[in-house]
Amino acid sequence: MPSYVPLDWNPRKLQIIEPTPTQNQEQEEPPAQQKAATKPPPKDKPPPEVKCPPTDATEVGTLSPNGRKILESYELVDGVCKEVYRNVPVTEQLVKAIPSPYEAAQTAGIAVVATTAALSTPFRVWIIKPVVKKLLTKAKEIVTRKKEDRPSTFLRRQAQRKARK
């Protein structure tokens, strides 16, 4: 049968074991003569190349969160990649804000169904309430009805014999 034994962890008995540095023969320090022979790196390092646009950048043509500007391009300015936005004309903002005919029709349909359901509630109550009341009354009668005492077989036979005479 499978079982599980949890770790016995006690912070007071915790022992920290640091790894010991291992040195291979190849990693041993070279003699002092060889150190002098190696050339120091050149002092003039070229600045690291900045990737523009960065790999995690948003796509060109994406609207800003408020929808008023659109990302047009990326520019490298003083070694920093900056986003270039352009303003979106008001007419274009309005066109994008208006829903498609399908969306408008679907929303209107939902509104009509909801309004109809809300307005027809009193009528449904007048019609349904008496029917439900009758059903509940009948169900209550059936549940609470006393069971008639059934006569025994002997009593039934006696009643049948009396009825024949």
Image (tube, helix red, strand yellow):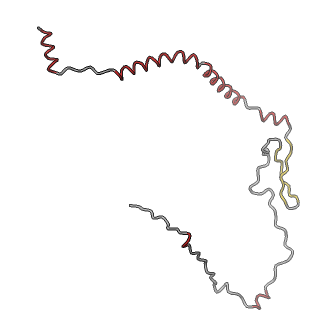
Q: Residue at x 63, y 25 (%)?
A: 114
Report x, y in % for residue 149: 24, 21
Count of marks placed on residues: 0
Residue 109 occupies quadrant = top right
Residue 126 percent across, percent down from the top left: 54, 15
11 relative to 33, above or below: above
**Which residue is the extreme one toward the top?**
165
In the image: residue 31, left or right of residue 94: left
Where does the image place residue 138, in percent across and percent down from the top left? 40, 18
39 is higher (above) or lower (below) than 3: below
Q: Quadrant of residue 162?
A: top left
Nearer to us in this view, 141 or 108: 141
Q: Quadrant of the C terminus?
A: top left
Please state if 63 lies on the left or on the right of 142 as rendered.
right
Going by the image, does 139 lie left or right of 99? left
In the rendered structure, the answer to whether residue 36 lies left or right of residue 11 reads right
Residue furthest to the left: 165
- Residue at screen point 76% across, 91% down: 32
- Which residue occupies 80% across, 33% down? 95
Whole-percent x, y for residue 129 in the image: 50, 18
Quadrant the N terminus occupies: bottom left
Q: Nearer the viewer, residue 128 or 35?
A: 128
Q: Nearer the viewer, residue 124 or 41?
A: 124
Residue at point 68% right, 28% down? 107
